[in-house]
Each structure stands twice: as structure tokens, then as C-alpha cells.
Image (tube, rainbow, N blue to C red):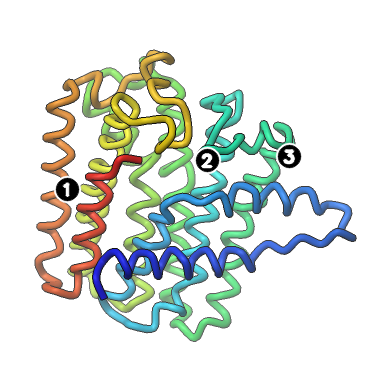
Amino acid sequence: MDFKNWMLKKVNEVDKYLSNIITNNDNNPQNIIYESMNYSLMSGGKRLRPILLLGAYEIFNSDYEKAMPFACAMEMIHTYSLIHDDLPAMDDDDYRRGNLSNHKKYNEAIAILAGDGLLNKAFEVGLEASMNSGLDCNKTIKALSIIANSSGTEGMIGGQIVDMAGEEKIHNLDDLKYMYSLKTGAIIKSSIEAGAILGGANKEEINALSVYAEKLGIAFQIQDDILDVEGTEELIGKPIGSDEANNKKTYVSYVGLEQAKEHVQKYSDEAIESLIIFGSKANYLIELAKYLTNRDH
């Protein structure tokens, strides 16, 4: 199967699985929270994190359906973070993926609780799969531990704190890359590592995939910075130029647009090079790196 069809198949399967996780019940007094959670969860997106987890798993095992609950848990964690990022107390964005942000569609309280609900549901789904998926429990618990750490204060939440502190914490390019490695890179990395662990990778294989994820995470975020300068609102789904308008430090503001593009290519090449030990088994992850670092949205 070529990469385009492989990725489309995975996106469709992830969407189908996600659509059955949170069900509305009109007779349930708290039904509005399920509606709000699904509003953001099913609003589209690249489904990058579940695809990374499934792609890593498939290097070692073909029965990727067993890993699907963990892949979808990553998307729920990612979606919760987007809901909270958009809040007035954070990035104060009115639009996400071309639609109203959750707090604009509902209200701030509902949006906060919807994010909380998605984070909690991610681990409900992961723990249930640990008991019922047929995968080794030691591997599933280790994978969930890595996922939990990556979304906490030493991962995504920590990165958001540094990002909000702005110039108080970010003084140079190394500080910026540190923030990227937590806010964006941590759950990209845990998606890859969790998939590898669930699939049965050994230590050397996990280390190689970790390098891939670290390099890809930086390249992905630099590309985001580039798109904020030269992307289009129609493709990105929210206003461009917001980083400059908010005086946020970005990769482009430190090195300029052309050098930022060179660095995207450099980190992408290094990510791909780290997969050499897997031979053709890593072809989908190689093509995924190329796709993500040459995207226009």
C-alpha cells in the first residue's frame, strides 16, 4: 500500500474508533459535556499522534487494531490541550480548524470541563484496553506511564507554562527549543515510544525511534512557525500572523524565514536517518516525516 492510502486508511479508522468512544444520551443531565467533548474531538485534524503510535507499532506487529485504543487516547489528550490552549486565559483564540473554539461554541466553564473530560477519558480507554486488548499488561502499563508523563508538568503542561511566561523564560533559541520539546514534542515522542513498546520493540529500537520523534517534533513545530508567517487562514483554520501580533518569540523571529526552512529540512533528515536500522519496515514513518515537514497546514 502506498503512503497516501496507508495514511488515509489510518485516519478513517481512528475517526471511526473515536466516534464510538463518547456517546450522547439525551436523557442524561450532563449530556452537554459529551456534546462539547465530541465537538472538538470530531472536528477533523491530521490525527498525527495516533498515526505515529500505530506506525511505530506496525514496525513490529501487523495487528495494529490492538493498539488503536492507545492511539485514540493520544488524540483525546491532544484535543484536550487544544481546547485549553484556546481559552482566554491561555492563547485566547476564537477559531480552531476553521470552526469556533470550544469556549466560543459553548462557554469557558464547559470548555474547561470538556478538556478535563477528554484527558480523563483517555486514561479510562487506555486502562480498559490494558485489561482487555490481549496485549501484555506490563507493556500496556509502561506505555500508559510514558503517555501520562509526557502530558504532565515535565511534558506538555510544563511546555505551556514556559510558553506563557514568554520572554521571562525564553531568552534564546535553546530556550525556545526546550519549550518546543515539552509543549509539542513530548506527546509526539510518547506516541512513538508507546507504539514501539506495545509492539514489542527492544531497547535499541526504542532509542532509535525516540531520536526520530525528537527530531520530528522540532521540525514539526518550526514548520508551524513558518506557516504562521506564510500560510493561509483558509488552510490553517485560524488567523495567521498571531505570533507576531502577540510578540511571541518563534523560530522564525530568531533565525529568519529562510534559515528556519533549512532547519526544518535538517531536523527532518536527521529524523529519517535515525530509522535506518529498520530498513523498509520504517518506510511509512519516513514518508510521514516528509509529509509533515512539507505541509501547508
- Neighbour class for label 3 at 10 Å: few (<14), some, many (≥20)? some
Task: Single out the residue that lies furthest toward the front.
Answer: 234
* Label 1 with label 3: CB-CB less than 8 Å: no
25 versus 61 height, above or below: above
Q: Quadrant of the C terminus?
A: top left
Distance from the alpha carbon under mark 1 to that under mark 2:
25 Å
SS class, disc 2: helix
Residue 61's spot in the image, x, y percent? 32, 82
Read off the residue under disc 1.
268
25 versus 2 height, above or below: above
Disc nearer the start of the sequence (1/2): 2
Read off the residue under disc 3.
110
Disc nearer the start of the sequence (1/3): 3
Identified by mark 1, the residue type is Ser
Q: 262 left or right of 87?
A: left
Identified by mark 3, the residue type is Ile
62 versus 202 height, above or below: below
- Neighbour class for label 2 at 10 Å: few (<14), some, many (≥20)? some
Task: Single out the residue that lies furthest toward the bottom.
Answer: 134
Residue 145's spot in the image, x, y percent? 46, 61
Disc nearer the start of the sequence (3/2): 2
Q: Nearer the viewer, residue 157 or 7?
A: 7
Distance from the alpha carbon under mark 3 to that under mark 2:
14 Å
Identified by mark 2, the residue type is Leu
SS class, disc 3: helix
Read off the residue under disc 2.
82
* Label 1 with label 2: CB-CB less than 8 Å: no
SS class, disc 1: helix
